[in-house]
Image (spheres, rainbow, N blue to C red):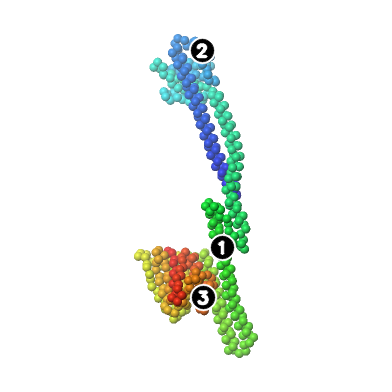
Amino acid sequence: MLIRNKLILRFTLLVLAIQLCFSAFIYYFHAANREQRFTQRLAGKGIMTARLLLPQQQRQAAALSPFHRRDLMTIINEQISIYDSQGHLIYTSADNLSQRQNSRYLPRIKPGQPVLFTDGDLEAIGITYTYAGNTYRIFAAGLDQFGIMQLSKLRLILLVGNVGSLVLIILAGWFFADQSLKPMARVVRQVERITAGRLSLRVDEGNGTDEIAQLAVTFNQMLTRVEQAFEMQKNFLSHASHELRTPLATVLGTLETSYAYDTDLPEAKQSTASAVEDLKHLIGLTNALLALAKAEDASFRRDTVRLDECLTQAMSYCQTKHAGRRIQLEFGDLPASGTDPFVVRGNEQLLTTALLNLLDNACKYSTEAVQVSLGYQGNKLAVSIQDTGIGIAATELPRVTDALYRAENGRHTPGYGLGLTVTQKIVERHGGTLGLVSEPGWGTTATLVLPAA
């Protein structure tokens, strides 16, 4: 179901429920008021009849009874019966009145506790009246024709009013939903104009305060990230194709030249050796690209990993690759309690790769010893790797984590420009941060910070 239809339906049901509750309250209040008013009228009529008849009961009852029956009847189908304290019927407004209901409720009448009941279409009340030290019980019944007619008219008015209001509520709900969804419809129209070739377009953020504006702002932020990702992908493909094409062309040229011109074994071996070096470079670049693709995959399995073991393994690999370089490890601040302070959640192979990349860069661009520190920064584990190498210029430092980008002063050193990119991706996938501080001629300090398990 469309949101528009849901809004109309919910708005209609909500307002209709409120209106029906209000109508039921009005009807109930009016019906209760009518009943109370009529029973009070019946009680007053019964007491007035008793006041007229009881003083003259012994002397003029025969004369007053016809007088009352003819002249005191002011309620439609009025019926009045009076019983003495022994429960004997001493007066009735008509000789043919049935006393079956009155006899049934007679024992229930107590002083100050009137009894209300119905006798067919008639409403009746039973009350007590005290005269000359004797307690009499009076029953008064009648038909509230005018009140019932008013109640019936009110019921008809409420029914017609609710049906008419239902139509108005539906129209109001449609208008309300249409006005509420107009900003969203505008956003949808604007989004439909955004394609892969028009990622620079943005959605109108409206007043910038309501929920639709917040949705537009969030969508624009997402578009910015998507545009950046597309641009990074375009640059990456451009650089990767160039980096792959160059060694492939070199290998092809070397082999074609060797095939065409090399006539003796030494020349052929020299050409083959050159091709082998180019192929090694190509394989290394391909492996780096695969490592980057793996680092960008956030669905890898996370286990409990000892970061100190990953660091030791990376140092061992790096020491083998750079046999003449000295790597010194020291421990920084550690928590006062805890049996295993170096545990993190993540992938051991990826974390070892990230640390190896940082160590490899430090050893590759520096001729002095590399200082490695493992400790805590607050409640997070931190690995700091410091070298005294060529350093990185401040203008180039923000770009060294871009894929295939290499600083100007390091392009003469063998490499692919992917190590820091892979490390950055791995650290981000593990919820950590990578910080770089560098000064040309003085060296670089790389700090990897990860949440402790």
Identify the residue at horizontal 56%, vertical 53% (top origin).
206
| Camera-nearest label, 1 or 3 | 3
> What is the x, y in percent for residue 438?
45, 72
Residue 67: which numbered mark, if any?
A: 2
> What is the x, y in percent for residue 66?
51, 12
Residue 226: which numbered mark, if any?
A: 1
| Camera-nearest label, 2 or 3 | 3
Q: Who is closer to the viewer here, 344 or 122?
A: 344
Identify the residue at horizontal 44%, vertical 23% (top origin).
109
Q: Who is closer to the viewer here, 374 or 124?
A: 374
> What is the x, y in percent for residue 141?
51, 22
Q: Is residue 200 visible?
A: yes
When the figure is inspected, residue 63 is found, relative to residue 259, above or below; the finding is above
Residue 339: name its quadrant: bottom left
> Which amino acid type is shown beneath numbered disc 2?
Phe
Q: Is residue 346 visible?
A: no
Q: Residues within 10 Å of mark 2 (few under 14, many from 20)?
A: few
Residue 264: name its quadrant: bottom right
Question: In this figure, which residue is indicated by the disc labeled 3?
Answer: 408
Q: Secondary structure at mark 1?
A: helix
Of the residues under marks 2 and 3, which one precedes in the sequence?
Answer: 2
